[in-house]
Amino acid sequence: MSKWDGKSKGTLLGYKIFVFCIRKLGIKAAYFVLYFVASYYFLFLKKSNQAIFYYFNKRLKYSYFKSKIHVFKSYFTFGQTIIDKTAINAGLRNKFTYEFDGIDILKKLLAEKKGGVLISAHVGNFEIAEHFFAEIDLDCQISLVTTDQEHSVIKNYLESISEKRSTIKFIIVKDDLSHIYDINNALSNNELICFTGDRYFEGVKCLKGNLLGEEANFPAGPFLIASRLQVPVVFVYVMKEDNLHYHLYTKESNAKHRDAQGLLNAYLESVEYILEKYPIQWFNYFDFWDKLN
């Protein structure tokens, strides 16, 4: 089945190297170092190469040669988003520019004072979203619902170099479902709850949906929970563009209450819209559609 194994790219040493380059040589110099890192991934990571090649070749219908080129571009762009996130955490937010689509949706959501659910995906660079909210003067608390505790060492390191402590809280999904109470408490405090809806773990309840013309499994939890809460649900993506520029997209879901499948379908439409604009920024390096075995 199409599932993620819970392991992401990136090591603590890699982050430290990039921080050194950013601080001593600048962001663009760190991008130069990235050519060597992306080349290593392109040459030696067989499984992730097959997965991302399938995305370009079979789902986006790129030619063999174009797909190969875009595999390298994908690794390079993914590395750039990591460098950008690290640079922003290190106090270089003013080096970047920001653009907003749907800012009124977020302002309206917070003005209603009943909280809201944000659903994003592993595209672009959502982890810098809180810096967008600071840019548009939105004073809000974001709680990220996650099962991934693997990179706590990296998270601790990034916090140690940050000039400003991150305001994002983490709600860890637990077998006893106690995270549901944490979510309700956050919403009662007019906080924003954020899920990512595109990585399915084996053994977790799933929903099936069609993405880019092929059926895949998606975690049911985010869509079951969000569809049952009496709060707005908004799809949010932060996408990288040229010249240290980022573009935030927001779109409110019009799915019916308690219709988890309808919410998933609306979410997948929004993901396809983003991928049409930013095909290189699909950062799921595993057998997403379960077609490689």
Image (spheres, grey):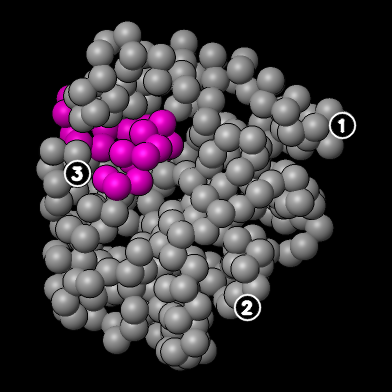
Look at the image and say whether residue 252 sits in the magenta stretch. Answer: no
Q: Nearer the viewer, residue 176 or 166?
A: 166
In this rendering, would 121 be left or right of 191?
Answer: left
Calculate the distance from the C-alpha at mark 1 to the C-alpha at mark 2.
Answer: 33 Å
Question: Residue at 72% across / 56% down in the picture?
Answer: 159
Spot occupied by residue 253 in the image (x, y as percentages of width and height): 27, 69
Q: Secondary structure at mark 1?
A: helix
Task: Say which amino acid is labelled 2.
Answer: Asp
Instruction: Say whether disc 3 or disc 2 marks the residue closer to the N-terminus.
Output: 2
Instruction: Say whether disc 1 or disc 2 marks the residue closer to the N-terminus.
Output: 1
Task: Give the class, few, some or many, for how many residues have Cα within 10 Å of label 2's Cα (few <14, many ≥20).
Answer: few
Question: What residue is pinned by disc 2?
Answer: 139
Task: Say which amino acid is labelled 3.
Answer: Leu
Work out which quarter of the rendered image holds the N terminus and state it: top left
In this rendering, would 247 be left or right of 229?
Answer: right
Task: Give the class, few, some or many, for how many residues have Cα within 10 Å of label 1's Cα (few <14, many ≥20).
Answer: few
